[in-house]
Amino acid sequence: MISDNYFKIFFVPNNLQLARLGIVAAKRLMPRAVDRNLAKREIRQLFRVHKIKFVAIDIVVMVRKNEPLDKAAKTNSLSKLFSRVVTRCAES
């Protein structure tokens, strides 16, 4: 598990050739469906861009806070977390 103030990432190696992504955006934190869907869409896009899908791993990203962050800050935070996940999996 890796986390920061805004996201928590759980990861486990799998026996497949590609990564699988799960996203948890709680209704308690984001009451509006529009906000939850936007968060999920941004996480999926960053997952694709980061090329983490070529690592055999199962990942669950949990949104921890729904604070008004600009898109660059969210992207930077998730990029750092995804990089840490890849390095930890490479060590294993």
Image: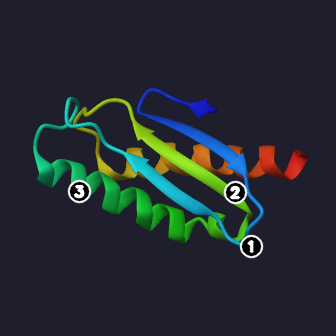
C-alpha separation, residue under disc 1 versus residue under disc 3: 27 Å
Indicate left or right for 5 with 68 as reference.
right
Q: Is residue 63 above or below residue 57?
A: above
Q: Is residue 90 above or below residue 53?
A: above
Q: Earlier in the sequence, mark 1 or mark 3?
A: 1
Residue 26: quarter of image: top left
Residue at numbered disc 2:
57
SS under mark 1: loop
The amino acid on which the numbered mark 1 sits, given as a three-letter code, is: Gln
SS under mark 3: helix
C-alpha separation, residue under disc 2 versus residue under disc 1: 9 Å
Residue under the point 42% across and 67% down: 45
Please tell me which residue lies in front, 50 or 14: 14
Query: Mark 1, residues whose alpha carbon is within 10 Å: few (<14), some, or many (≥20)?
Result: few
Mark 3 and mark 2 residues within 8 Å of each other at the beta carbon:
no
Q: Earlier in the sequence, mark 3 or mark 2?
A: 3
Q: Which mark is residue 31?
A: none
The amino acid on which the numbered mark 3 sits, given as a three-letter code, is: Asn
Q: Earlier in the sequence, mark 2 or mark 1?
A: 1
Q: Where is residue 76 shown, x and y percent of the image? A: 49, 48
The amino acid on which the numbered mark 2 sits, given as a three-letter code, is: Ile
SS under mark 2: strand
